[in-house]
C-alpha cells in the first residue's frame, strides 16, 4: 500500500507534466469556474481543448475507432490530476465527452462516428444531454417529450416537448435526447433515443434563473422539431437501455470546488470568539472540524481506492457511489456553520469580511442544487441500497 | 394548566393571518427582492401601523394598544410566516423595548407614539463584533474593542457596521464606549455627521446598513455604564419574539413541502407517499414542535418577566433557529429542481433563516448563555 | 398563558395532596421500577391500588357504568402528577387499566363489566395485552394466532399460536387477544378480538431474556386453548377495529425515567477534562448539553400543551405523537455520549465511579428497546406522516 | 496509485475469515459471555498462536513472522468482525509494540518470542484517568495526579484501575511517576505484591481488572522520563489497529442488518424494500466506507512510519468509532424486537462498540489530537 505510480504511470505522468508546462496557455482566465461566460472564455476553452486533442490528451481512453488515443483509464486520471495543478480555461465539453458522445458513437455507424467524434473531441462542437423533464423529476423513465414518425415516407420524426436542467444547452450544438415514442407500452418500454441538432428549427433554449442568482442550467423547448431516422440511437422503443448506458458513463466525481474544513480552520484562526482568543480555540469548533476533516479525507481516500482499481485494470466497486451524497450535505452544513460562527457578519455579502466568507456563501447557495442535481440524495440512497447493498427492490417503483 | 394562547389570541392569529395573506403575499415580497432600490414594504408598514401592531405592547398613554407580549408573539409568528419585508423586529422588539425598559418618561413620550403611528423606524446597534454582547457567567464584561463607537459629552464617533434595517431607520440606539463604561445613546440618523452605506446580505428582502458617526450629538438612554445590562435584557426579549418569527417561517416551510409532496408525482405516485419524503418531513415536524414548545415557554417568561427569561429566551432562540434552518433546507430538497430556482419561493425562506439565526448573535452564543444559567441554577 | 390550575383544578389538587400525604404507604420499596419483582412487591402494589380505588383515585376518568368515579382527564393528570411526587409501590396495572380493560368494558354487557371492572381497578386482577407476534413485527394486522370455532355446538373457540412482547404476562390473570379467525379474507378483515384467562389450560408464559439482562416482556404460547363465545369482543372478523380503538387508548406518555441532561451536567461538573478544570468547562460538552436541554424542555412543554387541551376539555392534538420518537433516540445518544466523556471508566460496571454512571448504562442498554417497543421509530414516523401531516398513504402498505 | 491491500494480503484476509468462522463462531463467543468465570477463549488463543498471528509483526530473530503492519491490519479487521474474545489488542498492539519500540535487545529476546508462541499475555496501563495520556499541542504534559502508581528504585506502589485484559495478563507495562518524571516499567503480574481484582464492564466478552502494587519489583522499559512519549506513539499505532477491529465489527453489523432486512417480512414485503430501512442502512454504509478510507490511510501511515501517523491514526480512530457505534445501534433497530433479546447477537456488537470506543481514550480526545496536528500543519 503506497501512493506511488507504477513505472509506466510515472513515465506517463512525467511526459504529461512536461507537455502541460509547455502548452498550458498563459491567458487562462485565472479561475476554475463551473460555467462559461462570454465568447472570449468559450474561445479559449475551445483552443485549449483542440491543443489537448492534437496531443492525444483529450478523451484519453476513447478507442481508436472513435478517433481516440486508446489510453487507459488511469492515464486519463493522471492527466486530469496534472492538468488540475494548472490554471486552465473552463471546460464546457466534459458532459458531452463523458456521457452523450460515447453513447452516440457506440450506437452509430462509422460514418457518423467520423462526423462527430473528432469535432467533439476537438472542442469544435459542444454536446449536451437532454433527459430530465419538468414533470418527471427524478423519474427519468417518465419522459413525456413526444416523438412521432412522420407519415410522409421520409422516415423522419417530429419531436414536441420540454427538457430541463440541461447544462451548457445555451452554448451546445448537439444533444442526446430521450423521447416518448409509445404511450401505450409500460413506461420503460416506450422510449427512443436520438441525437438532435440544437440549431434545428423549433428548438428554443432558455436559461434557468437559479436560487443563487446564476444560470448554469437551461430549459430546452421542442416545437415540431423534425429529425431524420438516422439520428436514432438504438431500436425504436428501446431507448431506456441506451439511457441507462449513458448514465453509467458518468465519470468519477472529482469536483473539489466549494468550502471545506481547511477554509473553516483558516477563518476560525483569525476570528474572535467567546471562548479563548480565536474561534479555533473553541473546542466545539474543533470537534466539528475533526468531523469534517474525516469526511473529506474519507472521500479523498475513497477516490484513491477507485483510482487504484483503475490502475490495476479493475472496474471500481461501489465506493464511488457515496461521493456526491456525502459531499453535498457536508458542504451545506459546513458552510452554514461557518457563517453562524461569523455571526451577523457571516451573512454580509460585501467585500471586506473574512476572506473565506464569499466561498462559504457560494457553497451555502450552491449546496441545495448539488443535493438535487444528477440524482437527489433520496435517489442516490435508493440506488446504493439496491445496487450496492443488494436490498430488495422498492415495491413502490411502478413500472406502468 | 393553561399553557396555550387564549381564544382571543387565537382569534387575533386567524385575523392577522388572513390579513397578511393578501397584504404580504409572496408577490409583494418579490417586489422588494427584485428591486435593488426598494428596502422595505412601505404600504404594509403603513397598514400594520393602522391596525395598531407597531404599538401592540406600548402602553396606551404612550400611544399604543397596551396589549401583552403574548399578542406580540402571535403577530411575530404570523409576520415570520410571510417573511414580512419590514423593519418590525428592529423597531418593535429592539428599539421600542429598549426605550420602554430604560427610557425616561420624556423619551417615551417623544418616541413611542411615533413608533405606534408608524412615523418612526428604529434600529439598534450593540457590539460591532461577534457575540460579545452576551455576557457570560465566566466573562461578564463586553469587550471594549468590539464596540466601534466612542462617546464623549454625548457626541459619538466611530462605525457600526451591518446594522439590520439601519438604512431605513430614522433613529438608532447605539452602544458606545464612554471612557471606561459602556452606555447607550439615541441618535437621530438624519442628523449632521451621520453617514450611512447600504450593506448587501444573503437576504435582500431585509435592509442592512453601516453607520458612520462623526461628532454626532446624541441623547443618552439609561444611566452611564448601563448599556450592556440593558441590551442584555432587550436581547432576551427580542430572542423570544424573533423565535416566533422563525417558528412561523419553519411551519410555512413544512406546509409548502407537505403540499408539494402531496401533489407532485414521480414514479407514478405522489412523492409524499415515499418514506424518504415522509420521514424527512416528520423530522422537520419534530423540530418545529420542539421549537414551538420552547417558544411557548419563552412567551410565558417574556410575558411574566420571569426570572427564567434568560434560560427560556436562549432555549427558544436555539430551538427555533435550528428548526427554521432545517425546515428551509429540506423544503428546497423536497421540491427538487423546482425548489432550486429563483422563481420558487423556497430560497426566500432559506435566506431569511440564515439572516435570523445570525441576527442577534448566533445560536452557539445562546447555547453558551443557556448552559451558563443552567449551571448557575443547578448550583443553588 | 400560565401554569396555574383553574379554581376547580386547584381544589382537586389540594384534596388529592392531602389524601396522598395521609395514605401513601411508608413501606414502598423506595424506587420507581419498570418491573415488579417478587411477591412482596406485588402485594404492596395491589394494596396501594386497592386503597386508591376505594378513594376514587384509580381509573379516575372511567364512567360510572364501569364503576369509575367519572372524573375528568385533567383530574387524572393532576392525581398522577401529585402521586409521582411520592415514592409509591410499582404499578403493574397501567397497561390493563389504560388499554385492555377499557376495551373489554366497552364491548361487553353489564354483567361482564361488573365481573371485571372493579376487580381490575382494585388491583385484584391484572390484565395484559396480546397483540404482537413474532412473525408480524410492526404489522399487527398480520396476526397469525389462529382461532377456530368448535363444531361441538358449544359455540366455543380454540386458540393456537404465539404472542410476544407482552408486558406483565407473567403476573397477569387475563389478556386481550387479537386472533386470526379467517385466513381467506384480506388481512384486516379476518381478525377477531377476545379476552382470555391466562390460567386456562394450554397457555404458557415464558419471560424474554432481554439484551440488558432483565426480563420485563414475555412470550405467551397458546396450545388448543378453549374459550367461550361470550369472551368475544366485537363481531367475528371485526377485530381490527377493536384493536385500533384499544391502541388509541394509549395514555399520555409520561415516563420520565432514564438519563437526562441534568445528569450529564452533574457528572460533567465533577469530571476532569482535557479542556479546563472540568468536563463541564468544555464548550463541546456545553453545546451538546444545550441541545439535550432543548429537546427535554420541548417534550416537557409539549406535554404541558396536551394537559392544557385536556384542562380545556379538548382532545389533545398531534403534539403527543413525537414524545417517544424524540425521547428514545435522545436517551440513547445522550447516555452514549456521557459514557464516552467518562472514557474507559464509562464502561466499568462496578460501584465507585461517578454516581450517574449506572443510570447512563441502564439508559444505554434500555434505549434500543424503547426505540422498538410500542411502535418502532419507523412506524411512528409513518403514523405521524399520515395522520398528522396528512401525507398520502404509503402505497407499499399491503392490504392482503 | 496503489491504495489497497495486495493480492497476498487479500488472500490472507480470505483465509483468516474462513478460519475464524469456525474457530471463533458466535456460539464460542457466548461461552465467554454466559460463563462468569471464563475470561477469554484459550483454545482460540492457542490456535492463532500456532498460525503465527501473535508474532505477525515481530521480527524473525525474535520468534515472529516478520510480516508488515499491513498484514496485522488485515488480521485485526477479521478479529473485529467476529468480536474475538481474546487479549489480542493488549498483547499485540500495545504490549509487543511498546517492547519493539522501546525495549532493549535483551528485553525483546526475553518477551517477544513468548508472545509469538502464545505463552505470554501482556497488558498496558497508562494514565489512570481520562485522556490525559494524549498530550495536546496546548498542554504537553501528562497530569501526574492521574498516573496512580509511583516508582522508586524500580519498586512500584499504587493502583491501576480498569486495565483491559488486566486479569489474564502475565506481564504488564505500567506508566509510573518517578519523582518528577513519568517512566515505563515491565511488571511480572504474578510477582509478589501484585493484587488483582476483576472489573466488570458493559462487554463481558473481554477481560478487565484492577492492579494494585505494593513494593513490586519491576524492570525499566525505555529511559526515565520517556514514558509519555513512548506511549503516545504506541497509542497511535494501536489506534489504527483497533480502528480496523471496529471497521470489521461495523461491516459485520451492516451485513447482519442487510440479511435480516432481505428475509424478514412485514406488511407483506421484505422490510429491506422499505425506504425507511434502505436509507438507514445506506447511512450505515456511508459511515463504514468513510471509516474504511480513513483506516486505509492509517494503515499506510502505520506501515511506513509516516510523519502523518498522529493525524492518520486520529482520523481512523474517530471515523471507525463513529461507524461501529452507529452500525451496532441501527443493526439492533433493523432487527426490531428480536434485536433487543439476549439471544440475538446484535447486543454483542453494541457492547463491543462501547468498549472499543472508550478503550484507548475516547474519540473526543482523538478529535482534539487530530485538530492540534492539523492546526500545526496549517501553520507551516
Image (tube, coloured by chain):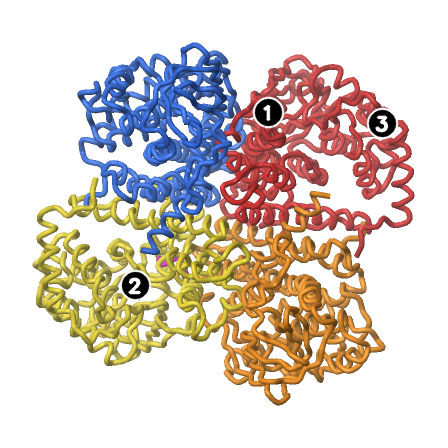
Chain colours: A red, B blue, C yellow, D orange
Can residue D95 be found in the magenta stretch?
no
> Which is nearer the N-term, disc 1 or disc 3?
3
Name the chain letter of the residue that bears numbered label 3.
A
| Label annotation for residue C57 | none
Let me know if residue C86 appears in the view. Answer: yes
Is residue C184 depicted above or below A181 in this figure?
below
Asked if labels 1 and 2 touch by Cβ distance under 8 angstroms, the answer is no
Label 2 packing within 10 angstroms: few (<14), some (14-19), many (20+): many
SS at mark 3? Answer: loop
In percent of width and height, residue C214 lies at 39, 73
The residue indicated by pointer 2 is C178
| Label annotation for residue A24 | 3
SS at mark 2? Answer: strand
State how far apart marks 2 and 3 are (Cα): 77 Å
Tell us which disc is closer to us: 1 or 3: 1
In percent of width and height, residue A144 lies at 56, 27
Q: Which residues are magenta?
A: C137-141
Q: Main secondary structure of the magenta part?
A: loop
Q: Which residue sits at x=41%, y=27%?
A: B175
Residue D124 appears left or right of A118: left
The residue indicated by pointer 1 is A352
State how far apart marks 2 and 1 are (Cα): 70 Å
Marks 2, 1 in one chain = no
Screen quadrant of the N terminus of chain C: top left
Residue B72 appears left or right of B159: left
Q: Residue furthest bottom?
A: D192
Amino acid at each position: 500500500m503506497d501512493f506511488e505510480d507504477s513505472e509506466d504511470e510515472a513515465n506517463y505522468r512525467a511526459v504529461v507534466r512536461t507537455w502541460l508546462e509547455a502548452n498550458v496557455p498563459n491567458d487562462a482566465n485565472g479561475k476554475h469556474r463551473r460555467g462559461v461566460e462570454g465568447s472570449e472564455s468559450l474561445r479559449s476553452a475551445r483552443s485549449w481543448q483542440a491543443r489537448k486533442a492534437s496531443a492525444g490528451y483529450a478523451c484519453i481512453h476513447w478507442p481508436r475507432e472513435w478517433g481516440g488515443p486508446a489510453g487507459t483509464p488511469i492515464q486519463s486520471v493522471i492527466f486530469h490530476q496534472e492538468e488540475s495543478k494548472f490554471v486552465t480555461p473552463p471546460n464546457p465539453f466534459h458532459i458531452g465527452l463523458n456521457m452523450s458522445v460515447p453513447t452516440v458513437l457506440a450506437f452509430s455507424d462509422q460514418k457518423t462516428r467520423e462526423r462527430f467524434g473528432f469535432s467533439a473531441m476537438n472542442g469544435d462542437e459542444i454536446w449536451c444531454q437532454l433527459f430530465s423533464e419538468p414533470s418527471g423529476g427524478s423519474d427519468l423513465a417518465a419522459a413525456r417529450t413526444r416523438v412521432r414518425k412522420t407519415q410522409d415516407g421520409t422516415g423522419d420524426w417530429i419531436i414536441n416537448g420540454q427538457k430541463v436542467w440541461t447544462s451548457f444547452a445555451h452554448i451546445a450544438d448537439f444533444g442526446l435526447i430521450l423521447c416518448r415514442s409509445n404511450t401505450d407500452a409500460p413506461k420503460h418500454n416506450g422510449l427512443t433515443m436520438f441525437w438532435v441538432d440544437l440549431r434545428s428549427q423549433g428548438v428554443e433554449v432558455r436559461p434557468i434563473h437559479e436560487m443563487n442568482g446564476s444560470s448554469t442550467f437551461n430549459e430546452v423547448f421542442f416545437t415540431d422539431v423534425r429529425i431524420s431516422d438516422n439520428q436514432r440511437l438504438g431500436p425504436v422503443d428501446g431507448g431506456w437501455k441506451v439511457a441507462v448506458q449513458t448514465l453509467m458513463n458518468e465519470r468519477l466525481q472529482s469536483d473539489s470546488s466549494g468550502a471545506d474544513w481547511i477554509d473553516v480552520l483558516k477563518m476560525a484562526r483569525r476570528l474572535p470568539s467567546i471562548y479563548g482568543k480565536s474561534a479555533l480555540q473553541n473546542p466545539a469548533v474543533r470537534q466539528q472540524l475533526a468531523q469534517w476533516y474525516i469526511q473529506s479525507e474519507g472521500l479523498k481516500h475513497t477516490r484513491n481506492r477507485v483510482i487504484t482499481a483503475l490502475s490495476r485494470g479493475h472496474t471500481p466497486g461501489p465506493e464511488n457511489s457515496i461521493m456526491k451524497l456525502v459531499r453535498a450535505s457536508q458542504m451545506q452544513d459546513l458552510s452554514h456553520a461557518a457563517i453562524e460562527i461569523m455571526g451577523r457578519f457571516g451573512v454580509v455579502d460585501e467585500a471586506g469580511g473574512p476572506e473565506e466568507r464569499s466561498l462559504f456563501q457560494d457553497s451555502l447557495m450552491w449546496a441545495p442544487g448539488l443535493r438535487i442535481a444528477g440524482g437527489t440524495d433520496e435517489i442516490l440512497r435508493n440506488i446504493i441500497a439496491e445496487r450496492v447493498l443488494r436490498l430488495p427492490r422498492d415495491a413502490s417503483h411502478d413500472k406502468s | 394548566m393553561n399553557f396555550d394562547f387564549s381564544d382571543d389570541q387565537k382569534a387575533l392569529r386567524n385575523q392577522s393571518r388572513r390579513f397578511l395573506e393578501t397584504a404580504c403575499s409572496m408577490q409583494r415580497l418579490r417586489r422588494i427582492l427584485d428591486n435593488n432600490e426598494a428596502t422595505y414594504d412601505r404600504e404594509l408598514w403603513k397598514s400594520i401601523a393602522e391596525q395598531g401592531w407597531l404599538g401592540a405592547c406600548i402602553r396606551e398613554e404612550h400611544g399604543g394598544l397596551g396589549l401583552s407580549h403574548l399578542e406580540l408573539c402571535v403577530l411575530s409568528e404570523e409576520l415570520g410566516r410571510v417573511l414580512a419585508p419590514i423593519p418590525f423586529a428592529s423597531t418593535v422588539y429592539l428599539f421600542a423595548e429598549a426605550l420602554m425598559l430604560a427610557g425616561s418618561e420624556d423619551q417615551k413620550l417623544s418616541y413611542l407614539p411615533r413608533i405606534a403611528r408608524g412615523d418612526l423606524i428604529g434600529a439598534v446597534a450593540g457590539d460591532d463584533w461577534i457575540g460579545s454582547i452576551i455576557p457570560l457567567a465566566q466573562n461578564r464584561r463586553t469587550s471594549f474593542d468590539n464596540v466601534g463607537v466612542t462617546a464623549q459629552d454625548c457626541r459619538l464617533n466611530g462605525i457600526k457596521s451591518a446594522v439590520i434595517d439601519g438604512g431605513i431607520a430614522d433613529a438608532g440606539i447605539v452602544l458606545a464606549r464612554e471612557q471606561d463604561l459602556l452606555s447607550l445613546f439615541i441618535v437621530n440618523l438624519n442628523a449632521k455627521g451621520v453617514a450611512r452605506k447600504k450593506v448587501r446580505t444573503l437576504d435582500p428582502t431585509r435592509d442592512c446598513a453601516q453607520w458612520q458617526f462623526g461628532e454626532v450629538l446624541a441623547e443618552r438612554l439609561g444611566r452611564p455604564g448601563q448599556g450592556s445590562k440593558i441590551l442584555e435584557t432587550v436581547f432576551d426579549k427580542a430572542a423570544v419574539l424573533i423565535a416566533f418569527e422563525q417558528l412561523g417561517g419553519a411551519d410555512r416551510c413544512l406546509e409548502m413541502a407537505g403540499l408539494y409532496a402531496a401533489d407532485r408525482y414521480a414514479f407514478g405516485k405522489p412523492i409524499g407517499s415515499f418514506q424518504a419524503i415522509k420521514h424527512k418531513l416528520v423530522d422537520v415536524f419534530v423540530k418545529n414542535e420542539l421549537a414551538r414548545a420552547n417558544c411557548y415557554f419563552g412567551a410565558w417568561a417574556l410575558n411574566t418577566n420571569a426570572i427564567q427569561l434568560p434560560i427560556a429566551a436562549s432555549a427558544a432562540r436555539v430551538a427555533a433557529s435550528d428548526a427554521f434552518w432545517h425546515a428551509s433546507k429540506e423544503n428546497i430538497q423536497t421540491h427538487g429542481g423546482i425548489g432550486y430556482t429563483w422563481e420558487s419561493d423556497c430560497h426566500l425562506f432559506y435566506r431569511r433563516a440564515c439572516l435570523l439565526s445570525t441576527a442577534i448573535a448566533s445560536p452557539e452564543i445562546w447555547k453558551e448563555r443557556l448552559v451558563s444559567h443552567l449551571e448557575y441554577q443547578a448550583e443553588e
